[in-house]
Amino acid sequence: MKRTEPQTIGELLSEYFAQRQLLGGVVEGRAVELWSDVVGPTVARYTEDVYIRQGVLHVTLSSSAVRSEVHMRRRYFISQINDAIGSRVVRSLLIK
């Protein structure tokens, strides 16, 4: 089927990734990238490692005080990351 209407690069890439079932990994990678922006420079400074696996964002922090603060605000951070991405990629946050 020929396309008659122009598409943006974003639309073309989304379609390409969806067809090849690669979209999940790309979106999860975006969630990891957003961590520092969402938590701010203070928490980012104490962040040692961030990765996502099966909807769980794993974060290693070097300060127990920051770890406690992030734990109390974890729902907010999850919400902010998911809102920025536009889908519910992060289901929970595991703080180490």
Image: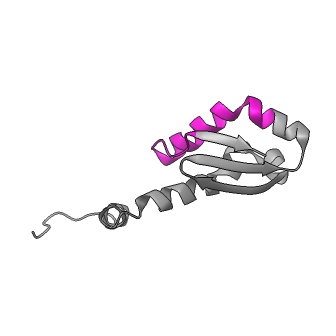
Residue 51 image-quadrant placement: bottom right
Image position, residue 40 (x, y; %): 75, 45
* Residue appearing at x 64%, y 32% in the figure: 76
In the image, is 68 to the left or to the right of 17?
right
80 and 9: which is toward the camera: 80
Write the residue at 46% across / 44% down: 86
Q: Is residue 32 magenta?
A: no
> What colour scheme was applied to this rendering of the protein?
one colour
Give the residue at the far front of this rendering: 54
Above or below for 56 versus 5? above
Name the residue located 75 percent from the left edge and 29 percent from the top edge: 72
Residue 23's quadrant in the figure?
Answer: bottom left
Q: Which residue occupies 76% across, 37% down? A: 70
Task: Give the image location of residue 48, x and y in percent.
Answer: 81, 57
65 w.r.t. 26: above or below:
above
- In percent of width and height, residue 63 lies at 90, 45
Query: Would you say residue 77 sits in the magenta stretch?
Result: yes
